[in-house]
Image (cartoon, rainbow, N blue to C red):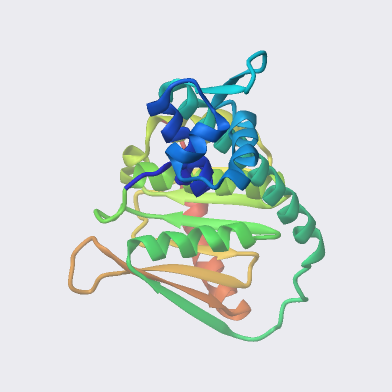
Amino acid sequence: MATLRDLGLSEYEARAYRALLNTGPTTAKELSRASDVPMGRIYDVLNSIEQYNLVRSQTASRPKKYVAVEPSTALDRLLDDKKRELEEKAEQYESIVDDLANELDAAEPVEEQFWTAAVGPDETIDLLLERLAAADRDIVMVAADPSPQVDIRTVGDEVLAHLEAALDRGVSVNVLMSRSLVNALSPTVGRRYQEALQEREDFAVRTNEDVRGSFNVIDGVEVVIQVPNPLGSGEAFGMIDLKDPEFAADVHEKFLPRWEEATPLSF
């Protein structure tokens, strides 16, 4: 059950404000009795909720009297305060990430084989986006028919955002897609591919009807392969990420003839 404490008030502050709503204009002494806030704490509590702009005081009266701000206004003010706190926290965390990104330099890549795998549509997409974000030099992306398990319109936006980020950090990108996948993409993604990205010299996207599988070659040393479900036609089972320069070179060699036969993307 929601309470005023969820919006940042202490137990005493919440009690005092609720009591003021019932008492109307009252003194600190009367409010202490009505709210069960100790007299030794009541002035600090009143000063605190006054700083939250939840109460108004009548300073001319002796003793001083207090009245609660209407609940709708008070809640809006507490909400605005929380939003400001969250924005400040977000800026603080972004600054920390920027500092750590410069500090935590990755070690030189180890020249040995390594593989990992993801099973399930969400895990598969997470692994793909992670590896796209790790590219330093070039990305070759081959994408066939969309899986019915995946919302290709949403995923297309996410993949495109990662490709744009890769281009911005100097990575070249070649994308080969099946025509059916192109038709499944959202119009927004299609326009961004054609109007924004295709103007860049380090980006190219082509289509080929003879595209059957989906895989990516990252920096010429890593292959990310989508694995179809052997028990479900057209469904994606998972994804394997294999770091092996020799295997990556073989895959890229198989890719080149299909790329040469493909046609530039058009809508």
Q: Is residue 256 in view from this perspective?
A: no
- Vertical comparison of 214 with 157: above or below: below
- Between 16 and 155, which is closer to the camera in this rendering? 16
Classify residue 161 by image quadrant: top right
Please indicate whether residue 165 sits to the left or right of residue 36 in the image.
Answer: right
Please indicate whether residue 145 sits to the left or right of residue 98 in the image.
Answer: left
- Between 142 and 136, which is closer to the camera in this rendering? 136
Q: Can you name the residue that lies furthest to the bottom here?
A: 112
Please indicate whether residue 136 sits to the left or right of residue 116 in the image.
Answer: right
What percent of the width, then of the height, locates residue 77? 53, 27
What percent of the width, then of the height, locates residue 113? 59, 85
Q: Name the residue at 58% across, 71% down.
A: 222
Q: Is residue 217 in view from this perspective?
A: yes
Please indicate whether residue 147 sits to the left or right of residue 193 in the image.
Answer: left
- Vertical comparison of 264 with 73: above or below: below
Number of labelled discs? 0
Q: What is the quadrant of the C terminus in the image? A: top left
Q: Name the residue at 70% across, 83% down.
A: 111
Classify residue 184 by image quadrant: top left
- Between 47 and 79, which is closer to the camera in this rendering? 47
- Vertical comparison of 31 with 130: above or below: above
What percent of the width, then of the height, locates residue 134? 63, 62
Classify residue 106 by image quadrant: bottom right
Q: Name the residue at 60% across, 64% down.
A: 218
Q: Name the residue at 34% across, 49% down.
A: 209
- Between 262 and 157, which is closer to the camera in this rendering? 157
What percent of the width, then of the height, locates residue 197? 59, 36
